[in-house]
Image (cartoon, rainbow, N blue to C red):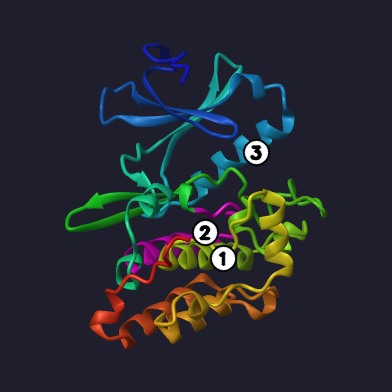
Amino acid sequence: MDQTLTGKEINGYQIGPLLGIGGMGEVYQAIPPDGSTPIAIKLLRKDYMADAKLQQRFIRETRILRALSHDNIVKIYDHGLIDGQQLFYTMELITGMPLSTMMKRQEFSPLLYWEILRQVSAALAFAHMNKVIHRDIKPSNIFIQPKGNGLHVVLADFGLGKQEGVDQTMTEMGTSLGTPHYMSPEAILGEKPNAVSDNYAIAIMTYEALLGRPPFDFEFAHQIAMAHVTHPIPPPIDLRDDFPTCLEDVLMKGLEKKPEERYQSVKQFSDDYLACLKALSNADRKKVYHVASN
């Protein structure tokens, strides 16, 4: 990756290594002006600064993160312009790995995944309480860090987020936003985003974590997208005949095609998941139900 800013000073921040390049931004490690704990600095890529819509999206993410102070949501510290030309904000440095990487490296039992689900659900419930819809919930936007004897989960990347009643941008009908594997049917059809669409994505991730694969995984993105609209979700019991019935019930309700038939809050989803977990035997809650590869 191009380390064009590494070693430079920006607004008093000493810029360290490039950590990653996303859809519209670059993220570097940096030392703040007071020389304290390293942080991360995200900059809108220079080649996008002429795009008013992308500028607005970056500013939206900054504003949303400033409004959301929660232990499981990435913390923002500072924001502004570099030399009056390039948008940036600074945030906590996340040292853990994305859930997408963890999913490739290990298998999840219902009990192990609960440690992640409960924290993601708490973060998303807080965002929804503050009228913020994430709109891009997926494993690569969830970071896992060790904390004591457990895990600390951080929800990040609110670049597609929308604050209801405040943000009137990015709401045009017929425009779909997100990642096909985790998009709800209504989001794919370009309908107005809502919290229940985020809840669908949480249920998709849970399905994938427990079974080792998402419900739909075709070759092309448009095939995956349309499957969410037209294809029934493969019941877990059809993939693993020993899959717990109560967990299947939770997943299938979370993945209803019609938003009104789905869980209306992420707390309801996580509460039902926990109730099922408690009802399982110790062996079943620690069992791995991943589907064997073909």
Residue under pointer 3: 57
Decide which of tag 1 and tag 2 comes sooner along the chain.
2
- Would residue 120 be counted in the magenta stretch? yes
Q: CA distance from mark 3 to mark 2?
A: 17 Å
The amino acid type found where label 1 is placed reads Pro
Q: Which of the pair 207/239 is nearer the observer?
A: 239
Decide which of tag 1 and tag 3 comes sooner along the chain.
3
At horizontal 68% and vertical 36% (from top left) the residue drawn is 56
* Residue 152: x %, y % from top left: 30, 54
Decide which of tag 3 and tag 2 comes sooner along the chain.
3
**Does residue 206 sit above or below 16 in this rendering?**
below
The amino acid type found where label 2 is placed reads Ala
Q: Which of the pair 281/68 is nearer the observer?
A: 281
**Residue farthest left in this picture:** 149
* Residue 243: x %, y % from top left: 41, 80
At horizontal 42% and vertical 78% (from top left) the residue drawn is 273
Mark 3 falls on what kind of element?
helix
Q: Main secondary structure of the magenta part?
A: helix
Of badges 1 and 2, nearer the viewer stands 1
Residue under pointer 1: 215
